[in-house]
Image: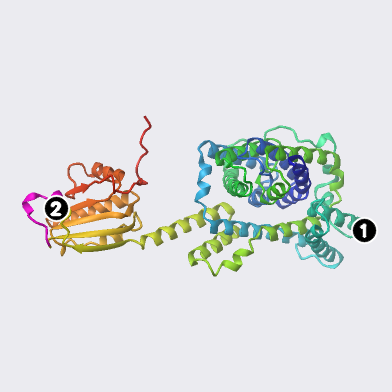
Amino acid sequence: QNALAGLTCSLAMIPEAVSFAFVCGVNPLVGVWTTVIMGGVAALFGGRGGVMTGASGACAVVMVSLVMSKGPEYLPAGALLAGLFQICVGLLKGGKFIRLVPYPVSLGFVNGLAIVIAKAQWSHFNDPVTGQLLTGARGATMFGLTAVTAALIKLIPFITNAVPASLLSIVIVTVVAKVLKLPVTTLANMAGAETFKGGLSIIPSLTLPAVPFTLATLAEVLPYSITMAAVGLIESLLTLQLVDGLVDDGTQGSTSSECLGQGLANVASGLTGGMGGCALIGQTLININSGGTSRLAGVLMSFFLGVSIIACAPLLAGVPVATLVGLMFVVSYSTFSWSSLRVIKKIPVTDAVVVVLTSVITVWKDLAVAVVAGTILSALSFAWQQSQRVAVTSYTSDTRYAEALPRGDGELGADSKTYHINGYIFFGSSSNFQRAFDPTNDPRHVVMDFMEARVLDYTGMQAINQVCSRYGSQDKTVIIKHLSAECASMLRALNGKNAPYQAVVEDPSTDPKYDVAASRPTPKK
């Protein structure tokens, strides 16, 4: 099953690898060889089996500006540097932070990516000389073949699934265009016939990128490489999570290994003149649905694809550009989460805003900035919501903790008040927490009960101190109970001998158990 899945994916990889190279503005074979090299390396060293890696649209749209401004020779340098960044992330165990990306951000990410891919295709409908929209026979052919390709990709699965629909559609449209002698622009017209001569001579050699190794070059490439590394890891780690959910084999993919695998694959791609890439959601789904769940499927995909490009490169020369554009429109359509449009009015407003904002920034700026912005907005929204959910209730005449008070004060009676705190005490809720107390009008003795509360950070502990200090300035005493043991210990360490409260009453049998985010882990003995 893994061998057949690898063969199926190798066929499905060819048209899209060529298309992504086409988007990036480089030789189509660069995309194919990038997929061959990255697919094998990432399969061997990645986070788990089943994930398919190759040249990707997400990385291509990031690097296209570098290619246009500096030339295609800078593309391998960008991929190499991006790979080094990804290796560093893997070594530092940074991949685990993908768990912080909320689902609305993921929706916005894929929707924005779909729009970017579709947007990149419109330039192919313009005359390369005049920049105007194609008209006449060439324009009709371009629009017609694009539409026919897209239609075939959707219709062929109803007839047969023996061959990937995208590959069969491209073959059919290419044959029709050649038989009817339609006025089309082919890959050979764009890249030159020499590119598609085939044979062993087209195998890329291992060499450093042909760019000046200077600080000026680094400054040119660095922004694109950082963005590509971030975009590639985000898409790869999201794909890894998807496979974990689809493959019920009792194992979970390693995010750190996935970062290392993607980094090594991009380094190998850069050293062989490639364009870099990442895990591919579409091809991964094809692989899983075909029964490919082990690393062998990815390795065989790489092997089969390499053999086919050496033997069949001349056939790629006559592929019309229009059919690849049609394929990319279908990829864009399939990538977009149309269900998000149906639920947009049913989810919280803040989540809907995150989906739209992430999509807009993806189109306007880039994928990495969009995901970071969406995640920050989601985090701020969550913090705000939790900050509004702190509830403080109180009652008087509590004599249950009289023993913790100075004996000279006599009986508590009506001279005491207990506050019950409910919610999370942290930087976002500290102001609301402090406003809930009334040191001026409260009786002489106050009890703070934190049974239903959780102190999450240093700001929360400082808020407790400040409230206690306000009572102390009024010559009133405060008893604190039902803090976690760690929180109580940190509060004592924070104040030393000058605590603004009278006592912290500890009861291991009833005190809640939780850690404070600001704490340091206890060393293992």
Q: Is residue 136 above or below residue 51?
A: below
Q: Residue 240: say if magenta.
A: no
The C terminus, quarter of image: top left
Residue drawn at (76%, 40%) of the image: 3
Q: Is residue 297 visible?
A: yes
Q: Give the label on residue 226, or none.
A: none
Q: Is residue 492 above or below residue 325?
A: above
Considering depth in this image, is 362 or 489 the residue closer to the camera? Answer: 489
The N terminus, quarter of image: top right
Q: Looking at the image, which residue sits at the far front? A: 509
- Which residue is identified by label 2? 402
What amino acid type is highlighted by mark number 1? Answer: Lys
Specify the segment rendered in magenta.
402-413
Picture coordinates of residue 117, whole percent (x, y): 68, 57
Q: Looking at the image, which residue sits at the far bottom? A: 345
Label 1 secondary element? loop
Picture coordinates of residue 385, whole percent (x, y): 40, 62
Considering depth in this image, is 207 or 293 the residue closer to the camera? Answer: 293
Q: Is residue 273 visible?
A: no
In front of the other: label 2 or label 1? 2
- Which residue is identified by label 1? 181
